[in-house]
Image (cartoon, rainbow, N blue to C red):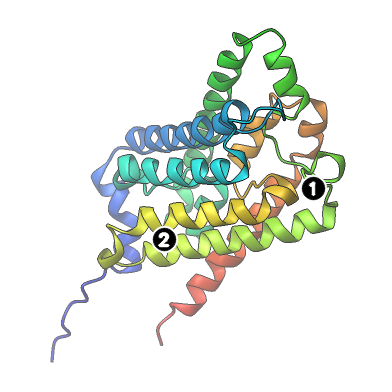
Amino acid sequence: MPRTPSASRTTKEQRTQHAETYTPLARYASEAFGAFLLVVGGVGTAVFASSFPDDTNTLGVGFLGVALAFGLSVMAGIYAVGHISGGHFNPAVTVGFALAGRTTWASVPGYVVAQLVGATAGASVVALVAADGPAGYFTAARESGFASNGFGASSPGGFGLGAVLVTEIVLTAVFAGVILSVTAKNEYKALAPLAIGLTLTLIHLISIPVSNTSVNPARSLAAALYGGPDALAQVWVFFVAPLIGAALAGLAHRVLRRRA
């Protein structure tokens, strides 16, 4: 007796959907745009609208505002171009999807390059605006780290390397796991960007004091380029930890969804 087709897409269908519908250039451009928006929205809010670089700014949005900015930025990006590329905007998420069997390994290099380029362009726009700000504004933003990630003296709360590694691995695993889960079925399609954005907001509320929240190597590198030598010296942590966390989520997703 023939099986009734599932309402959900199969893993194979999910893996090939974007390749069949959109050109590689369109998908890479979408990933670059999403990473650009994430950095302009998130890092831009941290540099211009929070209490940084002037702690006497009583109109600043603070940690809550920065967390919301990152969450809203990724949500807007996914709604805008997620249907084209899948809406990763994050090298760790792309690797997690590949390990889960949800995207092809052949697409990973192009996605990652596009994400790095888009994020760097976003940070450059923020830096360009800061450079034309009040006297000393860009210097103050740079000296405060330009919303970069770090540990030790570069951690907002003074947390050490071990705490930062654990936090970034665990929270990236959570983030990638949520993304893999809510994008697994068509039934969740309309709400997936909201769930992903709220998850990223929660992650920032937890970990801004610890690491200034990465969970995204592209975001970390982009900010570090303008955050000075200390930020660049520590950026390796925010490649290694998110990639480990996303890999764990991707492998777990693949195992748990495996059918006998």
**Residue at (71, 28) in percent of width and height:** 56
| Left or right: where 4 falls relative to 10 | left
- Report the disc number at residue 157: 1
Q: Position of residue 45 (x, y in %)?
A: 55, 32
**Residue at (36, 66) in percent of width and height:** 184
Report the amino acid beneath label 1: Gly
Q: Which residue is mark 2?
A: 102
Q: Position of residue 34 (x, y in %)?
A: 43, 37
- Marks 1 and 2 close (CB-CB < 8 Å): no
Taking 90 as reference, is 163 above or below it? Answer: below
Taking 250 as reference, is 258 above or below it? Answer: below
Q: Position of residue 161 (x, y in %)?
A: 84, 52
Say what secondary structure mark 1 lies in: loop
Mark 1 vs mark 2: in front:
1
- Report the disc number at residue 212: none
Taking 38 as reference, is 183 above or below it? Answer: below
Report the amino acid beneath label 2: Arg
| Left or right: where 92 falls relative to 193 | right
First in sequence, mark 1 or 2: give its number: 2
**Residue at (69, 26) in percent of width and height:** 225
Callout 2 environment at 10 Å: few (<14), some (14 to 19), or many (20+)?
many
The foreground one among 164 and 114 is 164
| Left or right: where 85 falls relative to 165 | left
